[in-house]
Amino acid sequence: MIGRRLIGAIPVLFGISFIVFLLMHLAPGDPVFLLLGENATPADVARVRHEWGLDEPLAVQYWQFISRAMTGDFGRSLKFGEPVTKLVFERLPATIELAGLSLVVAILISIPIGVYSAIKRDTLVDHAGTGLALVGVSLPNFWLGIMLIYFLGGRWNLLPVAGRIEYGMEIHAITGLYLLDSLLGGNFAAFWSAAKHLVMPALTLGTALAAIVTRITRSSVLEVMRQDYVMTARAKGLSERAVVWRHILRNALITVVTILGLQLGALLNGSVITETVFSYPGIGDLLIQSIAARDYRLTQVLILFFGIIYFAVNLLVDVVYTFIDPRIKL
Amino acid sequence: MRRFRYFKVFAGGVILVGLVVCGVAAPLLAPFDPQEQRLEARLQPPAWSGVHWLGTDNLGRDILSRIIYGSRISLLVGATTVILAGVVGCFLGAIAGYFGRGIDEIVGKVTEIFLAFPFLLLAIALMAFLGQGIVNIILALMMSRWVQYCRVVRGEVLSLKERDFVTAAKALGGKDFYILLRHVAPNTLPSVTVVATFAMAIVIISEASLSFLGLGVPAYIPTWGSMLSEGRSYMSRAPWLTIFPGLAIFITVFGINLLGDGLRDLFDPKLQRQ
């Protein structure tokens, strides 16, 4: 069954790459003119068109695109002048660090609220919890980020408002994750600085996710509470605490933990906005910079990268789910 | 409990109606022309008893008037996208669910490909290549949003087509498209309404996000997202430039989500039984 699912993924991967490939051809007018400006000479246009392979038939262009994708060689970025793949992998650890910490923030907020809301269903606590989740879902995260910058960064001057670490501070790169690298190198000043820089972006990104996960946790716990085995546990005289901890939570959290993986899309969506608001040098920020500079090739690669990561994680979660819950069949 | 659901629908509905009134009657409600620049009155703070209730921006434009006019874009983009995505998604979902086999396989694969992109990222990608503009933003958001309708409608149709009334209609000689349109489609309306309501909230936030990133509508049209983006440069001197447009987005999206929540609770038979 898993094999069938993996084989089924192949056409989807081709589809993703085809859509990303087509993006370049969506641009109104000739992308080369957009790239070089209206005053470009015909010789320049012909040279760039040839360099980019735009003088080839569409099918050949797609084949070249796929071949480049397979080997990871996408050429150089126009804006940065460096290989596109190198740029993406340089920025990736920053986004992973931010996404990881946001996930922690989201779990710490959402699971206690979701579980408590469900257990105290239809009480004031429940309404407050679900109301809070509704507020979280409705908050535009760029606005939340700006407000945090205004209050925590500007008015009260508690936290730095931009970047990943204090200017001039050096970290010996091992993994690219500043928190981890500074700890491994025993550089606690750098660790403190990196942690302070992460607080506001992680809160901004984590809040949106927390709101979604609170709702999922609540409904998952409610679903489990309706099961016969919970009634049996109560009927045999177990204390309420044992019923909740041993029977309800254990089963409900399986779903929640699995669904957390599927929320990666929310994190990727949010990372673009959050990184832009905080000038945080991750791949989301790189995407917006590449769009602003009309660096089409870099934009294309980043979108492909986001698409494949998201799809691969979803697939992985699906597969893991079948191991955790044998009732599910792919 | 049921009363609480009605309250959610009512409160959300009031906010949505408020948005519609603001958008439609903007010229009557706005105290100033949203584009009118009065440099002698630039960066004035909010004053409830003064001329500019919510203050003015760096070019002396009235914030309240710009927020009122900004609702037009949110409404236009939100409603048009939700309707267009709904038509495409419902049609594909209905034929995939009803006819099954090859059509279902193809629609399923296309859906899976579109679902492989995080929603906002796909819209960002499309806008990056299509360029700014209201039509482009609607197109980009529609292409990223039709999938949700498609999945819900397909699921509903799959179960509806096995029901007795469909078998009866077939026995009476009804043609497939007639049955689909006359008997099956109306039964999917409650679910589609819920999906559309939540989609409206997501689309409004996404339009604001795209405008904030400079990928939305052209800069001369006032939108809540672009107001926020422009206001960022004056954060320390004039925080009201970012606070009020953000509040407008939040209240609108909160209201629509409340309505969606209430409608879902009302339409969900499982919850009704309890």
Image: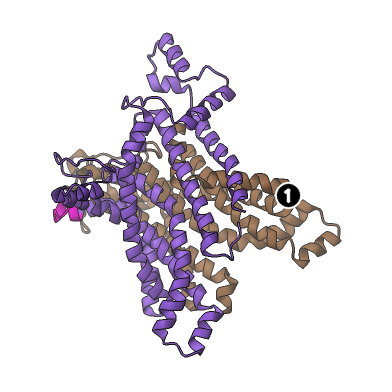
Chain colours: A purple, B brown
Query: Judging from the image, what secondary structure is the residue with disc 1 in?
Result: helix
The magenta region covers A151-159
* Amino acid bearing label 1: Arg
Out of A128 and B254, give the one closest to the viewer: A128
Nearest the eye: B67 or A178 = A178
- Chain of the residue on which disc 1 is drawn: B
Q: Position of residue B120 (x, y in %)?
A: 44, 46
- Whether residue A188 is visible here, answered yes or no, is yes
Foreground residue, B232 or A84?
A84
Give x and y (percent) for residue B3. 48, 78
Find out whether residue A39 is within the magenta segment: no
Query: Dot 1: within a 10 Å radius of its alpha carbon, few (fewer than 14), some, or many (20 or more) residues?
Result: few
Q: Residue at x 41, y 33 (%)?
A: A299
- Residue at horizontal 44%, vertical 50%? A265
Residue at 44% across / 56% down in the picture? Answer: A261
In the image, taking residue A104 as reference, residue B9 lies left or right, namely right
- Where, quadrant-wise, is the C terminus of chain A in this rendering? bottom right
Question: Which residue appears at 51% of the width and 31% of the height?
Answer: A21
Q: Which residue is mark 1?
A: B101
Residue B227 visible to an observer of this rendering: no
